[in-house]
Amino acid sequence: MDNIAGSKSSLRWAVHLSVAFLVVLWLIPTVGLLVSSFRTTDQISTGGWWRALMTAEHNLILRTAPPSTQTQINGKYVVTGSLAKSGTDLDIRVWGVSSRAIDDYTPGATAKLSKGGEITVSKDGHYRMEHTLPFTGKRGTRIFLSSALPPEFTLDNYHKVLFDPKNVEGMGQAFLTTMIVTIPATIIPILIAAFAAYALAWMQFPGRALLVAFIVGLLVVPLQLALIPLLKLHLNIGIGKGFIGVWLAHTAFGMPLAIYLLRNYMVGLPKDIIENARIDGATDFQIFMKLIVPLSFPALAAFSIFQFLWTWNDLLVAKVFLIDSSGQTVVMTAKLVEMLGTRGGNWEILATSAFVSIVVPLLVFFSLQKYLVRGLLAGSVK
Amino acid sequence: MYPAMQGIMAIVGAVSVCLTYYFVSNWLLDNVFLPAKGAHISRNINRANMIRPWLFLAPALLVLCVYLAYPVIETLRLSFMQRQGAEFVWVGLDNYQQMMTEDKFWEALTNNVLWLIIVPAGATAMGLIAAQLTDRIYWGNLAKSLIFMPMAISFVGASIIWKLVYDTRPIDQEQIGLLNALYLFFGGDAPQTWVTMPFWNNLFLMVVLIWIQTGFAMVILSAALRSIPEETIEAAILDGANPWVVFFKIKVPQIKGTILVVWTTITITVLKVFDIVYAMTNGQWNTQILANYMFNKLFSANDWGVGSASAMVIMLLVTPILIWNVYNARQEQL
């Protein structure tokens, strides 16, 4: 369209900018969660994810060692040590001995303590308390400080969420459960739908048009209607809640779309090839296996992607047909909702868990997008 | 690893059962019941060809009838019944009457109407804008695939993503939610708790679904825009139409049909989605919608009667689209 009269260069710039704006707007929420999943708890609570690359500051209240550890050096009572908890670093910017004035002193300066004596705190948190009289009391002196938190990214959250055996969230287990639900629930409906779609596309029989209309109608039926009767049915015939129930349910709920998509695609296959095969004596079964299935690969791929995304991301069907009180068969989406309730504030765990569940569909999406788009178009535009 | 084994066996088992069924039933038909030889050869071949489609269709039809068609009727029946112990008793319209007296139901219905207007409109409009803009630049495909991406994310995942955007911290702490940070940056006086803010919180939840559905609308509308005959646009430009006129007067009218399809598809999605509300507010703070109301009735209140009645309300809302779709499908086949 570049060569058409009337497209001005200022307008082209506006188009580029608007698209860039749209893309950023669409990406930002996800990026925020992704960045958060690589930050530590402290980092997350001290500043928004958009500051992840900047040094943040956080205010801490730390205690010196208790007076019981004091020693006598040259006639003075001395307590020394480090304010930093083991395994953490401090980079003190300012500090003080009162909660009202945490920025009284710079690192290296010496402050007078209210109870007598003085204290010197260095940049990395090492301190030395001195007094001519013994320090008394049970607990150490409180030091108020503001420490710099350099940018830091960590894989610890992922390690904790996926592999930590003590981790009560059990996201690793849920990941496995989701896989077990998803893979059969993707493969089984394709097989059944492909035969049906072939019959509806290429075999002549009375009532065919009516059946197609029936399937188009079922495409729209809300899942909600199926819940109670099917749960009742499953309980009555003894399937109860479990994998078999959820596979059956997913197979059925994906079926209308599968048949519709595959039939639309198969109808468009070249008539000559199929007629020729018939004339050469091929049976319908042979035509289906040797001609239709290979030729319909794009449509089969498109539907598998839909069904995979849908079953992987599903919450409702799993909650109704799979998850029982044993808690052994919780899928990731259900786990995430549970966590939203119990650990709503622990963003490092929430963000990481969410990403563990999102990453597989995203990989599928980006690697197989071509088929997905083709399938969407076959399904809705004629 | 026991469930994993079960999973593998399910795949192998189901696939082999299905293939065996299709193969064996087909073989039996051709060789045992109606063999294509002997005295009745032509009659047999004709009959076999009459029966074969039904062999191919049987498993699919069985699944469709048991899992989708039967439940519609059964839910309708259950909506007139009440569970007492293990028994179901006929109660007529009691469930519907009870539902009508509940404030939560009316709240859900009103909110659902809002969702049904705002989400399809928002997603279709954004999709149309995105489709039109990305079609004109060289990195359009990359942009498209990034805008399309939320489609792959689960509704629950999207809820968490947006919950971080809407996060609220007390005023004396750093805000970690983007929306509050921006609000304070542009002069807001105190951080807002977006998800509990009456009325507006509904919009904040709808944004999540619009964010997900825009990509879908964009992909389909972009294909439709490309199929518009080039001559109509060139003629308009030669006549001196500016880009706005070309877009609204030439392009949009030509893809009206596709816009309608996109709109109705998103409408159906809106009626089915319960995950977003369930994960973000569970219907508190006046954000209830029908799908979540039904789920609560079913599993929290354990009231199957009213649950079924509310499911029928959802079905009722879908029915016009169902009829329209079936009508269109019939038209195409004729």
Image (cartoon, grey):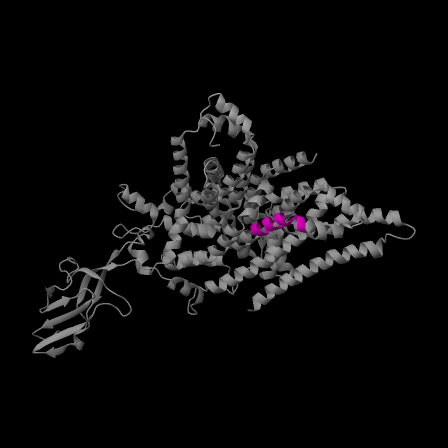
Tell which residue pokes out farthest to the right in this image: B39
| Left or right of A261 on screen, residue B109 | left
State the image quarter where residue A214 is shown: top right
Q: Which of A90 and B302 is in front in this view?
A: A90
Marks counted in the figure total 0
Could you tell me what secondary structure mostly forms the magenta stretch?
helix
Q: Where is residue A166 in the image (x, y as percent from the top left)?
A: 42, 69
Q: Where is residue B278 in the image (x, y as percent from the top left)?
A: 46, 50
Residue visible at 44% across and 67% down?
A163
Q: Which of B26 and B61 is in front in this view?
A: B26
In reply to whether residue A361 is colored magenta, the answer given is: no
Residue visible at 40% across and 37% down?
A16
- Asked whether residue B71 appears in the rendered view, the answer is no
- Asked whether residue B232 appears in the rendered view, the answer is yes
Q: What stretch is highlighted in magenta?
A: A294-306
| Left or right of B35 on screen, residue A183 | left
Tell which residue pokes out farthest to the top in this image: B239
In reply to whether residue A304 is colored magenta, the answer given is: yes
Q: Position of residue B88 (x, y in %)?
A: 61, 53
Q: Does residue A279 lie above or below A45 as drawn?
A: above
Q: Where is residue B78 in the image (x, y as percent from the top left)?
A: 61, 49
Q: Which of B85 and A183 is in front in this view?
A: A183
| Left or right of B297 on screen, residue A250 | right
State the image quarter where residue A15 is shown: top left
Quarter placement of the N terminus of chain B: bottom right
Quarter placement of the C terminus of chain B: top right
| Left or right of A21 on screen, residue B267 | right
